[in-house]
Image (tube, rainbow, N blue to C red):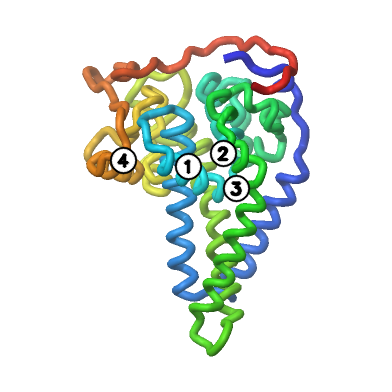
Amino acid sequence: MKLRESASITKFNWRNFIWISAVHIIALTLCWYYFTWQAFIVFAVMHYLAGMVGITFGFHRLLSHKGFKANSIIQNFAAFCGTLACQGGPISWVGQHRVHHAFSDTKYDPHDMNLGFWHSHIGFIFNRRADLNSIEEVSHYCPDIAKVKYFMFLEKNMILIQIAVGLSLFALGGLLGSTAGFDWYNAMSFIIWGIFVRLVSGYHVTWFVNSATHKWGTRPHNTNDDSRNNWWVGILAFGEGWHNNHHAQPRAARHGWEWWQLDQTWIMISSLKKLGLVTDIKLPNRVTKKDDTIKNGQETLPKVTPELIPHKKAV
């Protein structure tokens, strides 16, 4: 992979700082007051839709690594759910993730753990690399994703989509409330828990995969980075915490290789396979414990010094 010339430019991103700070403040200060069990159920459903269906199933295992194939309806729905996570649209998410795998735990890794836990967990979002901060630049890392018009639509309208879903939850909460007419308290609880609390939860679950699984855990496979299997991240992140397994064989759709390694996303993938809705699933090659190849797949990317290429119009 060739890095863009703009990869050498890092600036503090006030937009990201203000957005993430505001989301945290609203969630942590209002969740106690605007709590209903209905809102908590909405939170749980939205958390799984955005986090597991959207990020781990859609953005990660399907679009980033092509660990399996899905029909256009499932693929587009998963991409929509991933966009609801507000971690960037499919183009910026996939592009950044592919850079991470190409240069994992080196200075070219967007969330390099060598710069500290804070940087790998959240600091890289505030101190933003220029090649990952514009659609045009990041598109060069995932031209297959950037050329899809629907994905570009999601990328450019992430906030508007979040607002539309928020208004829908607000209306639903008001109509399902216990008071006569429109229940404004229940409507607000749906917004706080279905949008703000869910965003905060989803952010940190994803960020722990970037940070905790490159710092704590076991390393059963000889990868060329510091990825680790971390059981509690595995539980929180729908199976993404078995990160050393993933880095050993990136295209494998299954991350939890042992029977006791809970991988909720793999359960979803295998269930959809039984229904005939996903095909061509890439499975781990477990001929030997230290084998870093994948059946019908690719080997872990080697560490290389990137060639910086100048700005050009995105494909």
- Seen from the viewer's position, the closer of residues 66 and 315 is 315
Q: Choose the circle earlier in sequence order: 4 or 1.
A: 1
Q: Of circles 3 and 4, which is in front? A: 4
Q: CA distance from mark 2 to mark 3?
A: 17 Å
Q: In the rendered image, which residue does mark 1 sit on?
A: 76
Q: Position of residue 266 (x, y in %)?
A: 32, 40
Q: Disc 4 marks which amino acid?
A: Leu
Residue 10 at least partly seen = yes
Within 10 Å of the Cα at label 4, are there few (<14), some (14-19), or many (20+) other Cα atoms?
A: some
Judging by the rendered image, the residue that carries numbered circle 2 is 150
How far across and down, in percent of the image, does residue 152 sit?
Answer: 61, 36
Name the residue: 57% across, 72% down. 171
Residue wearing tag 4? 277
| Mark 1 or mark 2, earlier in chain | 1
- Between 79 and 245, the one lying in front of the other is 79
Residue wearing tag 3 = 86
Image-quadrant location for residue 61: top left
Question: Which is more N-terminal, label 4 or label 2?
Answer: 2
> Which amino acid type is shown beneath numbered disc 2?
Tyr
Location of residue 276 with respect to 196 vertically, above or below: above
Q: Compared with residue 3, is residue 139 higher up or lower down, i.e. above or below?
A: below
Disc nearer the start of the sequence (3/4): 3
Question: Which quarter of the image is occupied by the N terminus?
Answer: top right
